[in-house]
Structure formats: C-alpha cells, structure tokens
Image (tube, rainbow, N blue to C red):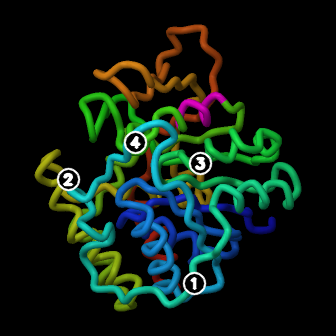
Amino acid sequence: MPPRKIIIDTDPGQDDAVAILLALASPEDMDVLGITAVAGNVRLELTQKNARIVCELAGKTDVPVFAGCDRPMGRQLVTAEHVHGKTGLDGPSLPDPTMRLQDQHAVDFIIETLRREDAGTVTLCVLGPLTNIATAFEKAPDVIERVQQIVLMGGAYFEVGNITPTAEFNVYVDPEAAEITFKSGVDIVVMPLDVTHKALVTRPRNDAFRDLGTPSGIAVAQMTDFFERFDKEKYGSSGAPLHDPCVTAYLIAPELFSGRHINVEIETQSDLTRGMTVADWWGVTDRPANATFIGDLDADGFFALLVERIGRL
C-alpha cells in the first residue's frame, strides 16, 4: 500500500513537534505534502518558525512549511505560553531555522493541494485550532468532498476541559472553526483528552527517548522534561501527556486505538461552556454520528512506536 498523503496543520508546541517528528520518520506510512502553521499554543510568527525548526531537527528540509491564519475566525487569540513556554518549544536549545518559509498562504496551499491531488487521497492531520481548515472550507467549499479524512487532536468528554472547566484548548481557541469542521460531512477521527491523557510520558518512557542518543531523541526528552511540570502540578499525573502524536500514530497503527462513532457538537454561544465538545458517547440523542471519538489506547504500544520511529532520525 502506498504511503498516505497528509497535510499537517499545527501550532508547535512540544507535543506537536513530536507528532511531526513521528510523521517525518515514517515515509513508508505517510507522505507529508506540507506543514501548515496556525496561531494557537503561541502566535503565528513562532508556530511557523517552530515548524521549520522541527523539520531541520529531523533533517527533512524539503518539506514545505506555510504560515496560515494568525487569529481565530471571530475571536481574540488565546495562547498557552503557560504550558509551552515563551517560544512554544522551551526545553531544548534548538537553532533558528535556515530553511525558508513558503510565500503561499497556508489556506491557499490546502485548497490548491486538495484540488490538485485525486479526490479522497489527502488526509488533514490537525494538531491545533481548526482555523486554517475551516477557513479553507469557507473559501473553497468544493474541496470539502475531496478530503479523505480529518484526524485531529481536540475536545474532551470524560476529561471535560483543560483551559476552562468544560473546554479543551484547541477547540476553545476557535470554536466557530471547530463547528464548521464538524458540520462539514468529512470523515473525522477525534483524539480528545480522554485518550491523550492516557499517553503519559513516565520517567522510563522519557529515558527511552534520551537513550536514543540522537539529536531528535534528546530534544524530545528535553521537551517533555519542560512541559511535564504543568501537568504534574495540575493533574497529579506521573508525567506529561503526549496529545498530538496520537494523531500521527493513529495513521500508522490504528489498532492501538479504540473509540465510538458518535455525534459531536461544538458549543459556540455560552460564555460558561464555550468550546465544549458535546459528545453523545452514550447515544442518548437522535443526532446523526459525525465523528469517531477515540477513548482508549495501548500506551505501551504507542510509546514503543514513537521510540522506534524517532530513533530512525
């Protein structure tokens, strides 16, 4: 089977970086057509820079990187420096990138690529707010039916929220974009906090990255050393959850994950619950299913995959 064509839409973020490294280390499974940056964890000028830093760390400077939307569709930008540090990639000391940023806007690249490639052959791997994706769908609705699948990190049900009591960060930043995406009719797979909080980087798992002895392995260990402080303090967990790598891992080894095909709606109106993913996990409504909502993973298998693949770089 040929590798799956993907566009990675991202707001790096240490866990985004690991997700990108996993994809770039897996050419037999994924053909990365491009990386599109969006404002989220930090501002756009940093997310596009960080995406290029990660490509250079992986030695994959031929992957084009595009800058996209610098703010949500209808709201002020909320960022997460309190988690990821002022650069978004705090932890390791990584050089500024020398590879160039593409001139084309990320939204136009997404549209052009979906129109150029055969219909149903491009998967959108979304690691941050859905602003670029929804903007592309609004600007060029003809591309919606050409998307093979969207696999995204966002939302929560049992774990409720991590930026407000009811909302996960990526959806909260741009709930209108999330609503457009979930109502698009595209085949969607969701990696919510319910599954990502089970992908914990414990000390032995982080040592496995460090023991690779490679620039990528050491950088991953240093990234999780930095941002685990937030989750340990907040949740009392044994380590930091690697949220975004669940997206790219799913495309390599879907058997590591399990969930349900359910209805997911996005709350956009309420100040109290704005950005909440209202997931009908128990099937108590007659709203049609529109997403596969992942609830569990084989954590040992997930980390074995990460270590093996990142060890290739």
Label 1 or label 3, whichever comes before in sequence order = 1
Q: Residue at x 46, y 78 (%)?
A: 54
Residue 129: x and y in percent read 47, 47
Give the secondary structure at mark 2.
helix
Q: CA distance from mark 1 to mark 4?
A: 28 Å
To which residue does mark 4 refer?
173
Label 1 or label 4, whichever comes before in sequence order = 1
| On-image quarter of the N terminus | bottom right
* Camera-nearest residue between 42 and 19: 42
To which residue does mark 3 refer?
151
**Whether residue 248 is visible:** yes
Residue 254: x and y in percent read 59, 52
**Whether residue 304 is visible:** no
Give the secondary structure at mark 1.
loop
Residue 264: x and y in percent read 53, 25
Tell me if mark 4 has few (under 14), some (14-19) or many (20+) residues whose alpha carbon lies within 10 angstroms of its own.
many
Q: Residue at x 86, y 60 (%)?
A: 116
To which residue does mark 1 refer?
100
Q: CA distance from mark 3 to mark 2?
A: 24 Å
Q: Which residues are magenta?
A: 178-183
Tell me if mark 1 has few (under 14), some (14-19) or many (20+) residues whose alpha carbon lies within 10 angstroms of its own.
few
To which residue does mark 2 refer?
231
Nearer to us: label 4 or label 3:
4
Q: Is residue 200 left or right of residue 50?
A: left
Q: CA distance from mark 2 to mark 4?
A: 19 Å
What amino acid is at disc 3?
A: Val
Q: Residue at x 67, y 68 (%)?
A: 104
